[in-house]
Image: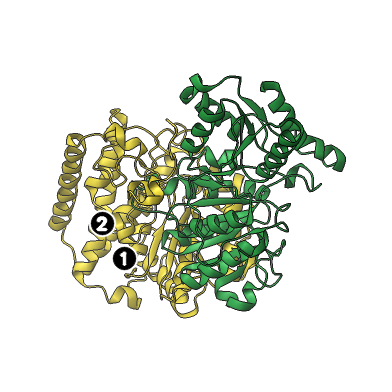
Amino acid sequence: MTNMEQAEESHAADPINASLSAEEKIGLYRDMVRIRRFEQTTLSIYQKGKIGGFLHLYIGQESLAVGAVSLLGDTDHVITAYRDHGHALAVGMSMNECMAELYGKATGCSKGKGGSMHYFAPDKNFWGGHGIVAGQTPLGAGLAFALKYRKVPGAVLCFLGDGAINQGAFHEALNLASLWDLPVIYVIENNGYSMGTSQLRSTAHPQGGLAQRAEGYGIAWDIFPGADVYTMRACTQKAIDRAYKKSRPTILEVVTYRYQGHSVADSKHKDGYRTKEEIEAQKTLNDPIARFKKILIEEGVLAEEQSKEIQAAAKLEVDLAVKFAEESPFPEEAAITEDVYYEVDEKTEAGRTGRHFFN
Amino acid sequence: MPKLTYRQALNDAFSEEIERDENVFLMGEEVAQYDGAYKVTQGLWKKYGDYRVVDAPISEAGFIGLGVGASMLGLRPVMELMFWSFAYVAFDQLINNAGNIRYMSGGLIHCPIVIRGPANGGTNVGATHSHTPENFIANTPGLKVCCPATAADAKGLMKTAIRDNDPVYVMENTLLYGEEWEVPEGEHLVPLGKADVKREGSDITFVAHGRAVITSLQAADILEAERGIKAEVVDLRSIRPLDADTVLNSVKKTNRVVLVEENKPFCGVGAQLASMIQLEAFDHLDAPIQRVSSIDAPAIYSPPLEKVQLPSPADVVAAAEKIL
């Protein structure tokens, strides 16, 4: 029986979940609520024309980043693609720096130089935030290579979308990860659509699912529904154990759903390549936050009143982040040519030798 | 001063840097057990083992990207492209990732990686294996690129590149690997962004990089022998950062300049130099700036015609004679 077939079975009793304190469980819930509220607000400010660029929302997928990141320790690392707000908040980046980045402000996590798709926090072992589909997958293998080279026990969670799995770079990364026994876990967040093209129309794959392609590389794999944060944690932990104990990679395919379009510029997501009925059904049956709330109430860990407080606190936190972002200054013009070369920024002798810019 | 081949000088640079810094490792296709497709890494796997000298599968996008990722955590990968022509299957990693991560992270991350290998025509291998992408790389702020022309510069630039904290792309030349030059003994570092006057002269300046420096030196010999003209040869060594001062000072001295490169003319390195010279030394020019590049077409296979396509000493002399 695969984990897909076990979908309706609870993973609450798995040791990794059974060991959670009430406070930790509420923390998982709070993080998911915070991500959703952040994303809802970014959609609203985008629609008001306050921020630019692309905006790929994580609404509906919150349990994946929160569940997986909650398992990580000091020597584990995270890297993802452009739908990166959820992962950024899950690793502990502040709403202020994330929101200010969307506004292109100097107080943004990347000083307004990266935007929505390029959040980074190396101090939290978070290596981006990458804009090109599957471009981050060899980097994830490289982080794992560095851990192994330095003989540091650890694991790398490299997230990607289902649309990324047909890119050559991903296959090359898989080959290297298996060939060199790298402790990297590729987490395919399968929301069913690579932009406007369904999995059926984009991806030839074995019956077992996208992740079963792993067999071609001798890599262990699993497929499971991601809406339940307990399931996400239990199944991801197995891959982390494999990384630590055997220094072997894993491919996880996590079945999920995005409520919004590929990006907010995706006009066809409600009545083009998907139907409103499909979206509503997912919201009703598979909402990660509603599901976990129900579980926690049944467990007696969370009360309705407390849930409301968490919602209100998240709203306040986002509202303050918007205020912070709006009141923050834009970068100075001189910043355009800063953070290009380390040696120039650090004013080293190398940075002072020769002409680096040609303006 | 002992004479070493360009190949051996590079090999010595790798040995010295591997021994100096435990974060330095070599990776590429055939670099380890095969001793390198062009034997540049000969003996290093035997000496330093699998840990420091790593054979990669033919998978440039994969292993170059892996190197970039490893460099974010502080390793100093020295990645060989068997030919720089193969970079094109790894462009997302070379340009988008290595070139932009520092900027897009607001300076939180840097990538101390070296990507190296030969980038030259003239070996009858056809257009797909004869690319000279130094202009592509120089067009990407965040990346550095250098093209050593001699063994001493190859060693000194490589060691500097490995110690640099930004991505440095080093373009070598298979036609130079077997050539010998004097190389200083002991620690020998050549800074990036510092050109070298390979031959002093007063009548005309040739600015070149890579093997075009050798071509320019030969042209200077011909001009001196046949006409008594003293040409100055400025070897850029590093394209970005660029030693603008040495170029401009030479032009101000000789008042005539020929820009020589094995790259194609359109948006080549010479185009950038011509723009800079006319803007910053216009009043010192006594004649239009001349450019000598490869003939503007894909690299031809046919051996005698490929020689015609690449800049020769006679081409440089002819360009010089237009303005003398």
Residue at left offset 16%, top offset 42%: A320
Asked if one can make out residue B135 in the rendered structure from this viewpoint, the answer is: yes
The chain holding disc 2 is A
Judging from the image, what secondary structure is the residue with disc 2 in? Answer: helix
Rounded to the nearest whole Å, what is the CA distance between mark 1 and mark 2?
A: 10 Å
Marks 2 and 1: in contact by CB < 8 Å? Answer: yes
Q: Amino acid at mark 1?
A: Ser
Taking the view exactly as shown, the residue that stands out farthest to the front is B228
- Residue A165 % position (x, y): 56, 53
Q: In this figure, which residue is indicated by the disc labeled 2?
A: A31
* Residue A192: % across, % down: 50, 49
* Left or right: residue A77 compared with residue B145: left
Side of A311 where B292 appears, left or right: right
Nearer to me, B303 or B199: B199
Quarter of image, res B72:
bottom left
Question: Mark 2: which amino acid?
Answer: Asp
Q: What is the drawing colour of chain A?
A: yellow
| Quarter occupied by the C terminus of chain A | top left
Query: Would residue B60 be found to the left or right of residue B175 on screen?
Result: left
Q: Write the residue at 56% across / 55% down.
A: B115
Residues packed near mark 1 inside 10 Å, few (<14), some (14 to 19) or many (20 plus): some
Q: Is residue B50 above or below residue B73?
A: below
Q: Residue at x 28, y 28 (%)?
A: A48
Above or below, B209 relative to A2: above
Residue B315 at x, y = what percent?
A: 75, 32
In the figure, the green chain has which letter? B
- Residue A129 in view, yes or no: no
User: Residue B104 location in percent, x, y?
Assistant: 38, 45
**Chain containing mark 1:** A
Mark 1 = which residue? A70
